[in-house]
Image: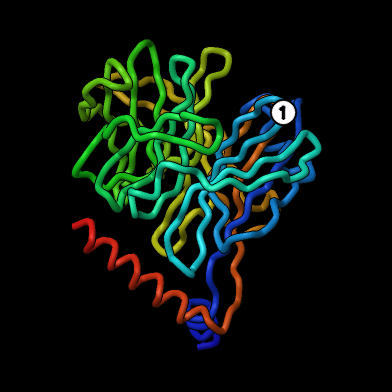
Amino acid sequence: MFNKNNKLIKKLFFHESWDIMVIKNSMHSFPHNTLDILSNSKAQLLNKKYTFQADPFIIEKEDKLFIFYEAFSFLNSRGVLKCRVLNKNLEETDDIKLQGFDDLKCHLSFPFVFYHDDKLFMIPESSERKEVLLFQSTEFPARWEKVKVLLSNVEYTDNVFFTVEGVNYLISTTLDNEMVIHTASDLFGEWKKIEPSLTLCNYHHRGAGMPYSNNNKNYILTQECQPGLYGKSIYIKELININPSAFEERLVANIDPIINKSAGIHTFNFSESYIVYDTKEWIFSILSPLKKIMFKCLVKYRKQYFA
């Protein structure tokens, strides 16, 4: 009975709070010493401004670190995309709301930023609109323009784009955390769904960061999601084989929240000199029941709006 009461109290009066951690380290050799650095380096916590500060993606440029992330509060129950700017001493100098996304009127998260043909693009998570959208940077880092609807009439989360042997891949997950793969000969071309035979190391597919290549090996990151336990840990996987007929992966490492004694971690990225990841804590609030009800109502309203 005691344990059941504890679970009920947690369900009613605790809510998730996500924060972003930054590590400055120029000796990172992914994935060989990744866990060692995460476990033994001092990480700096970004200033807390929102209930959720999550899904960090980074660009290192002109002695500055630009962290693109989801900012969420219970007041509007909708994630917006922002960019926190830090100098080389990890001092925060700006917090910029990204322009070009307000017309979408949906929850946004997972600002997957990437360079393609020397241009900067973003694929944000916009599943409420039932679209996978491509944006291009027009004025770094603040202004973005929608340039293409990659996929429509789909509810996909945390889309990850990469190229292998001249073929473009887009790996997505459904709201039931099922993996979906599309290919195209060009980023702006026609995206076609493929159904290769799968050789998987586990059934956690939801994107957890940028894909990386090192020493002619390709790696992807996925987050561990279980019923009632969102964003528990991150898996580093090597793509042994990927083509329209076969998808094979091998588990390399697991980034567990024990690295900073938190309750979860679900996005990890790095640049030449920096590592960023998000971290979860459970926060007690007497207003948690009201916040959760308000959140569910607003999400339901938006889904009806986009139906």
Looking at the image, which is closer to me, 39 or 104?
Answer: 104
Callout 1: few (<14), some (14-19), or many (20+) C-alpha neighbours within 10 Å?
some
Point out residue 217 in the picture as x, y percentages from the top left corner: 51, 17
Looking at the image, which is closer to me, 228 or 111?
Answer: 111
The vertical placement of 240 against 35, above or below, is: above
Residue in the image at 48% along x and 82% along y: 8
Tell me if 206 is positioned left or right of 37 in this view.
left
User: Quadrant location of residue 140?
Assistant: top right
Point out residue 71 in the picture as x, y percentages from the top left corner: 53, 54
Point out residue 121 in the picture as x, y percentages from the top left corner: 44, 28
Which coloring applies here?
Answer: rainbow
Tell me if 269 is positioned left or right of 192 in this view.
right
Residue in the image at 30% along x and 44% along y: 156
Q: Look at label 1 and name its amino acid.
A: Ser
Tell me if 246 is positioned left or right of 287 in this view.
left
Residue in the image at 75% along x and 26% along y: 26
User: Quadrant location of residue 31?
Assistant: top right
Q: Is residue 28 visible?
A: yes
Quadrant containing the C terminus is: bottom left
Looking at the image, the residue that sits furthest to the bottom is 1
Badge 1 element:
loop
Point out residue 169 in the picture as x, y percentages from the top left corner: 34, 25
Disc 1 target residue: 273
